[in-house]
Image: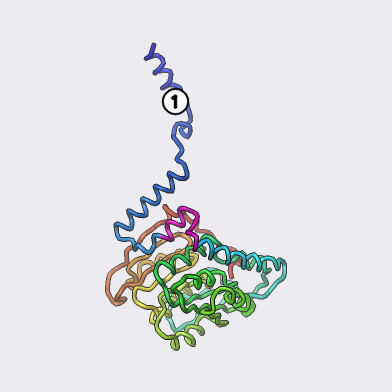
Amino acid sequence: MIERLKSKARSIIKALPLYRRIRVKTKSEIRIRKEMEIQGLIDSGLPVEMKPSLYFLVRGKGDEETETVAQKIENRRAEIASEGSKEVDIWISPKPKSADGNTNAGISPTPGKTHKRTMEKIASTGKNRRWGSVLYLLARSFRSTTVFELGSCAGISASYLSSAPSVNKLITVEGSKNLARIAEDSLARFASKSRVVNSLFDDAIDNELPMLEGKIDYAYIDGHHEKIATIHYFNKLLPYLTENGLVVFDDISWSYDMREAWDILRKREEFSHAIDLGVIGVCILKDNIRKKGAPENWNLQPIVGRRRIHTPPDRNKC
């Protein structure tokens, strides 16, 4: 009798669809597993400074300080969005592959075209709360002091960066005059240690950085989403970057062109580590950038979420 019942039970189980037979893990179990994976990677050599950002990405929430910073900045974003359909002229990123193939630091990439954008659209452009918080946590964990950003847009990402307690100087560059004014208004609410430069990226590097006291220990390369331009700006910034400094490349999956840029940059021998988070690429400079040897590469998309590479429309980025 018992054997007949067992046989019947096995038959019922086999008849069930596979998804009914597998116990679905709870969100808490998935989070704990991912946190254990992160700790395992740190034990294997991933820089420990990455831990707060990675834990934030898998938990979906930061500590009290992070949440307080984010709320203030997101209130500013909502204020910009409240101006709704009001339009301003801005420059946008050019189409992928619109530059020639020369990444020489002495040759300037061509900026994008001018288009009108509503304030509501501008507010939604750039890093959202999740990724703005990651930029902040990176600056806080690495104790960054001098930040240089290419691509201010409305000043939201710069507000996150400048809110890190260790940051005592931030320069953010924006080519669009209207966006630079919006960014200035945003940053005035969060840090007197920040400055917006309304200029082409190359001109800002040439005019601002030679006069900078000390070197940059956190460079955030955004704004010109194109392979050749991204590599060009890194090459041009390199002499002004400090050893063990942080270089964050934005939107590395924004297009196949940008993905190609990341595949080149993540192998640069100036870096000790290159960390793929899907949305951004985080690179750490060596303590001696002349030291030979490929960086340690870490693809963390399976842990923090995979980012689909897509073909962007012509008009969707500041």
Q: Secondary structure at mark 1?
A: helix
Task: Reply yes or no: does residue 55 show up in magenta.
Answer: yes
Residue range in magenta is 52-65
Looking at the image, the residue that sits furthest to the front is 64
User: Compared to 107, does 284 lie above or below?
Assistant: above
- Horizontally, residue 273 falls left or right of residue 65, namely left
Q: Quadrant of the N terminus?
A: top left
Report whether residue 255 is seen.
no
Report whether residue 198 is seen.
yes
Magenta stretch secondary structure, dominant: helix
Q: Residue at x 52, y 65 (%)?
A: 132
- Horizontally, residue 165 falls left or right of residue 84, namely left
Q: Residue at x 56, y 66 (%)?
A: 126
Mark 1 residue type: Ile
User: Compared to 231, does 21 lie above or below?
Assistant: above
The residue closer to the viewer here, 265 or 247, is 247
User: Where is residue 130 drawn, in percent x and y?
Assistant: 52, 60
Task: Reply yes or no: does residue 22 show up in magenta.
Answer: no
Q: Quadrant of the rendered structure where residue 2 is?
A: top left
Looking at the image, the residue that sits furthest to the left is 292
Q: Residue at x 68, y 74 (%)?
A: 88
User: Where is residue 108 drawn, in percent x and y?
Assistant: 49, 81
Please tell me how many numbered marks the rendered image carries. Answer: 1
Q: Quadrant of the C terminus?
A: bottom right
The residue closer to the viewer here, 162 or 247, is 162
Colour scheme of the rendered structure? rainbow
Q: Quadrant of the rendered structure where residue 314 is?
A: bottom right
Residue at image mark 1: 13
